[in-house]
Structures are given as structure tokens and as C-alpha cells.
């Protein structure tokens, strides 16, 4: 069952198109990463599904039903920045959130412990550091043990230890079977935490699906010889690669991760009377893949 | 609604600015009346002026039955503070972005804005309560005039004016979203600009200044002992029914436009 389905969501801010006909589904139990550079429409999209922004056109459903306040109460959401009353303590802010969500106050201590903020629960929110504010926002999301969590840049402003802690927390939440929708501009974060990914650029959804399908990792082998035409012909009879790309100086062969065998390539060419002048294995990083996708 | 008000209570319960302003505001309701009371007491206890005052103005204004109208009239000069409290209450949500968070956490937009409007009504009600108590205080301690509910309708008119100020303040807050500009425009409009418009319309447009938003409720609270003189000057009597209808029309408009704006805007 899909937790969330978007059908052709489009959003204009005046003349600026922030989202263009975005459609995808988030399966239950997945950690769905929404990946995109700054200003690609990630927060706008999450704002629309949380009813704080109005889509220009398109619809969305939660568990097949139209969105409602009752459904939002069952979803823990951190959107863009931690939004709390500056003059109230962390704990008092969580009481307000608990009241709105219709949950008891008895979980407040528990969630404060979970994000390591219990010691500072009585300090005013305005005295918190950026990282502590972020932790309080995550604590607020966990109130009422929701089945679905929405995190917009959850590690924003955290130090390396904090980042590791929050990623661990998200992984644990995923293990408990929760569905997590997470926006991030950090590819590394998505790769480490997510099972599914959707890539946004300038409001367009470039790709969506399982991480290992969308962000296919590849090994690239560069081969060169003095007679490049002959080399190309010889390489056609080689098995195992997925794509071949001819350049002026060399030819690129694309292999699935770990499938490239340089010795075999070398032997194959030599046996077919081509002596290689250049043979090199390049690991293609997700980073390049991401840039490639977003540079289309 | 009770649950929404409880949440609103949690928001202000530990908000010092709110309590300091409210306490000073309520103290000032008594204070501003005390100032006027002292002035009229001095006049009425002066040998020459006292006789003249009694002759032209009748009994002292801070005694029953005039005290209801007098206290309501004098206190209405402080209503911009009630508006200020509402502006702070609403624009705080915008500056902390908690209006978004409240919706995200599961309030509906309608719930949120209706709760704010109800809060405005509560502020108006509390203001009225303290005007009532102040009037009682001066009425009972006055040397003349026995207790009477004559003229008590002015206390109810005061409530309507207080509600007009609070809802107009909420509407301005929704319109401008930032506290500085909302407070500035609200003060300048209610204290200066509308009065300029009233004078201009009265002069050039046959006395139609009384139909403006705040003035329409102002007209319900004339200065008691100058009522007659005022009417002589403006050559027209205040049509209370018409003014009441106008006040209700404006209140309905603030309610409707505030609700629609919050329900349809990008937050």
C-alpha cells in the first residue's frame, strides 16, 4: 500500500514555477529520499502535502484518501526550520505540539531522552543552539509514535556527531517499520539512509524509484590503442559491459559495479592482435551520477 | 473549541510580554478614568465653577447613572492597547512560523483562525469586564446618585467597540504579517488617519464620516454631558440603530475576510 501518492502537482509562485507536474508514490515502510539541489522545490513539495501551501494544480492522497488534519496528526513532520515559541522552554513547546496532535504529555520525557535534549528541557527555546533546535524539532516529530515521518533536511545545522546520531535514529525508525519521507541536498545522506529516491531539479521530477535502480553505480574502463577503429571492432566481441562510448583518444566501457576485469580485457585485445596503450579503471561515484542527472 | 483555547492558553501562560502589557492595560483603564474623575471632582467642588457645571451639565459624570457612559467613553481611548495585544499575539505566530507548525501538527486552518478571532473576543470581554468594574467603583464611591442600571447599554456598546478594535487588529496582522508594520499602521489608522478621514468626509460628504469602520462604533459612545452640545454643532442626531447595524456589518467583514485570507493563503 502506498502511504503517499502525488498526482501531477504543479505550483507557481507568481510567474515562477516551483513544481512542474510532479507525480510519484511512496511505498509503505520505505525511506523515501527527495534529492535535489537548493531551490529545486523539495520544501515546496513537502509544504503542499502538509497543507501549508496550496498547489496550483494536481492532487495528492495519504493511504488513498484525501489529506486531512486528522491524518496530519498521525504524521511527524519537520519542515524547513524548527518552528517553536521562542519564549517557551523546550518542554512547554512540546506540550503545545502534543495537545495539537491529541497525544498525552507522558511521552514528552521519552522523546527528549531520545534526541539527547532532556538536560536542557527547561531552557527557553531562544537559548538553544541550531543543533538543539533541530533536535527539539525531531523530538516533536516523534510524539505519539507516528507511523509516517517527514523530515526536511533533518541534519541541517548539526555537528558531525549529531549528524551520525540522527542518521542512526532514522535508520532505527526505518527498522521499526516506519515510513520516512526525507528531503535532502546531500547525496551521501540519501545513499546511506534511503531505500527509495526521487530526484528533483528546477521543479521537475527527473527520476523516482529504488535507490539502487535510480542511482545505478557503474565501473568505467578506459581503453586506448594506436588503431582505435580496430580496437572498437575487437571490443564488440567482448562480453559483460552494458554500454560502450567512443572518444577521440580512448573508448569507455561501462560495467556493473565489480564486474570489470582488466586482465580479461587486456588478454582479449591482445589475443585479437590489438596492443593496448591505455587501460584504466574509473570508479564512477554517485556524486557524478547525481550531477549527470541534474545537469540534463 | 475548548481544546483550541487550551492550546492558546499554553501559548500565553508563560509569555511575560503578554502579562505585563495586559496588567498595565487593565491598570490604565482604571487610571485614565481616575484622571478624568479628579478633574471633574475639582470642578464640581469649586464654588463658582461647580454651580456653573451643575447648571449647564447636570449632575457629575462619575456618578450613577452617567458613570456607565462616562467610563465607557473615557476607557475607549485605551482600546488601541487591546488591539496591540492581539497584533502581538497573531504576528508572533508568523515570526516564529508556528502558524505553519500548528497546521502541520494537525490543526485545521479554519480552527486556527477561528481560535484567534475567539481570543480577540475574549480580550474584548475582559476589557469590558474591567470597564464595568471601574464604573461600579466610581459610581458606588460617588457622593451623589443611587445605584442604577440606567445607561448600562453603553457598557455593551463598549464591548462592540473593543471587539471592532481586536478584530481589525487581527485583520491587519494577517495582512502585513510583521509586527512592526502591523502595529504602526494600526495605531496611525485608528488614532490619526481615520479621524482625518472622518473630518474630511463630514465636511465634504455631508457627515458621512460616521460610517467609517472605527468611527461607526465611536459614534455609539458619545461624551455623555456634551451629547447635547455635540448634536447642536453637527446638527444631526446619532442614529443608534443604524450605527449598530454598521458595527455588526464591519465585524462580519473582519471575521469573513480574516477567515478567508488564512484559509486560502500560502502560509
Image (cartoon, coloured by chain):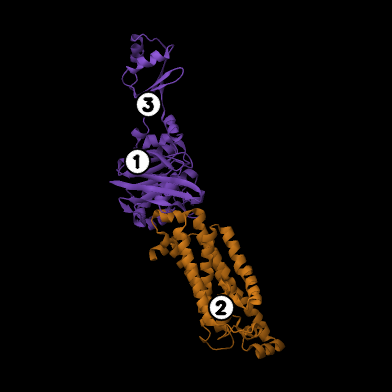
Q: Chain of mark 1?
A: A
Q: Is residue B188 left or right of residue A126?
A: right
Tag 2 subunit: B
User: For the residue labelled by badge 3, is the local secondary structure a helix, a strand or a loop?
Assistant: strand
**Residue A27 seen anywhere in this rendered image of the structure:** yes
Which one of the lettered chains is coloured purple? A
Q: Quadrant of the C terminus of chain A?
A: top left
Instruction: Looking at this view, name the residue that lies furthest to the right.
Output: B48
Percent across and percent down for residue A37 are: 47, 39
Chain letter of disc 3? A
Residue B65 location in percent, x, y?
55, 86
Q: Position of residue B215 (x, y in %)?
A: 58, 74
Residue carrying label 1: A31
Secondary structure of the residue carrying numbered label 1: strand
Q: Residue furthest left?
A: A1
Identify whether A118 is placed above or below B153: above
Callout 2–callout 1 Cβ contact below 8 Å: no
Which numbered dot is residue B72?
2
Query: Which of the numbered marks, if any, corresponds to residue B83?
Result: none
Residue A218: mark = 3
Disc nearest the viewer among 2 and 1: 1
Amino acid at each position: 500500500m502506498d502511504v503517499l501518492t502525488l498526482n501531477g502537482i504543479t505550483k507557481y509562485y507568481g510567474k515562477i514555477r516551483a513544481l512542474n507536474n510532479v507525480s510519484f508514490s511512496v511505498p509503505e515502510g520505505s525511506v523515501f529520499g527527495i534529492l535535489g539541489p537548493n531551490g529545486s522545490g523539495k520544501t515546496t513539495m513537502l509544504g503542499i502535502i502538509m497543507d501549508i501551501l496550496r498547489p496550483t494544480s494536481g492532487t495528492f492522497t495519504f493511504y488513498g484518501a484525501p489529506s486531512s488534519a486528522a491524518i496530519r496528526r498521525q504524521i511527524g513532520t519537520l519542515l524547513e526550520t524548527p518552528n517553536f515559541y521562542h519564549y517557551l522552554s523546550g518542554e512547554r513547546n512540546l506540550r503545545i505540539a502534543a495537545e495539537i496532535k491529541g497525544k498525552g504529555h507522558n511521552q514528552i520525557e521519552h522523546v527528549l531522552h531520545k534526541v539527547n535534549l532532556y538536560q536542557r528541557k527547561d531552557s527557553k527555546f531562544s537559548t538553544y543552539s541550531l543543533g538543539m533546535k533541530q533536535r527539539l524539532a525531531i523530538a516533536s516529530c516523534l510524539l505519539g509514535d507516528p507511523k509516517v515521518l517527514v523530515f526536511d533536511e533533518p541534519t541541517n545545522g548539526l555537528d558531525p556527531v549529531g549528524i551520525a546520531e540522527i542518521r542512526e535514529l532514522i535508520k532505527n525508525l526505518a527498522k521499526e517499520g516506519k515510513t520516512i519521507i526525507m528531503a535532502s541536498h546531500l547525496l551521501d545522506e540519501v545513499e546511506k539512509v534511503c531505500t527509495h529516491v526521487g530526484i528533483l531539479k528546477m521543479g521537475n521530477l527527473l527520476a523516482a524509484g529504488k535507490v539502487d535502480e535510480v542511482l545505478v553505480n557503474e565501473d568505467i574502463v578506459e581503453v586506448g590503442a594506436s588503431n582505435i577503429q580496430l580496437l572498437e571492432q575487437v571490443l564488440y566481441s567482448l562480453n559483460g559491459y552494458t554500454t560502450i562510448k567512443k572518444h577521440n583518444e580512448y573508448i569507455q566501457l561501462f560495467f556493473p559495479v565489480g564486474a570489470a576485469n582488466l586482465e580479461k580485457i587486456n588478454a582479449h585485445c591482445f589475443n585479437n592482435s590489438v596492443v593496448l596503450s591505455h587501460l584504466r579503471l574509473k570508479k564512477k561515484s554517485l556524486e557524478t551520477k547525481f550531477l549527470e542527472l541534474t545537469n540534463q | 473549541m475548548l481544546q483550541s483555547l487550551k492550546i492558546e492558553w499554553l501559548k500565553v501562560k508563560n509569555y511575560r510580554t503578554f502579562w505585563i502589557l495586559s496588567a498595565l492595560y487593565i491598570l490604565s483603564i482604571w487610571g485614565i478614568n481616575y484622571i478624568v474623575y479628579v478633574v471633574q471632582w475639582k470642578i464640581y467642588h469649586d464654588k463658582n465653577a461647580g454651580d456653573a457645571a451643575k447648571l449647564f451639565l447636570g449632575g457629575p459624570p462619575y456618578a450613577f447613572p452617567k458613570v456607565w457612559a462616562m467610563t465607557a467613553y473615557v476607557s475607549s481611548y485605551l482600546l488601541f492597547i487591546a488591539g496591540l495585544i492581539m497584533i502581538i499575539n497573531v504576528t508572533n505566530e508568523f515570526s516564529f512560523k508556528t502558524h505553519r507548525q500548528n497546521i502541520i501538527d494537525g490543526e485545521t486552518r479554519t480552527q486556527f483562525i477561528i481560535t484567534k478571532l475567539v481570543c480577540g473576543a475574549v480580550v474584548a470581554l475582559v476589557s469590558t469586564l474591567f470597564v464595568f468594574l471601574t464604573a461600579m467603583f466610581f459610581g458606588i464611591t460617588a457622593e451623589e446618585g443611587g445605584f442604577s442600571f440606567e445607561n448600562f447599554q453603553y457598557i455593551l456598546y463598549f464591548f462592540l467597540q473593543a471587539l471592532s478594535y481586536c478584530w481589525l487588529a487581527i485583520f491587519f496582522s494577517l495582512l502585513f504579517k510583521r509586527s512592526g508594520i502591523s502595529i504602526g499602521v494600526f495605531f496611525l489608522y485608528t488614532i490619526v488617519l481615520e479621524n482625518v478621514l472622518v473630518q474630511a468626509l463630514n465636511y465634504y460628504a455631508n457627515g458621512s464620516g460616521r460610517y467609517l469602520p472605527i468611527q461607526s462604533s465611536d459614534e455609539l459612545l458619545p461624551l455623555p454631558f456634551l451629547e447635547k452640545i455635540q448634536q447642536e454643532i453637527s446638527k444631526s442626531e446619532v442614529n443608534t440603530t443604524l450605527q449598530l447595524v454598521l458595527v455588526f456589518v464591519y465585524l462580519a467583514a473582519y471575521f469573513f475576510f480574516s477567515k478567508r485570507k488564512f484559509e486560502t493563503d500560502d502560509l
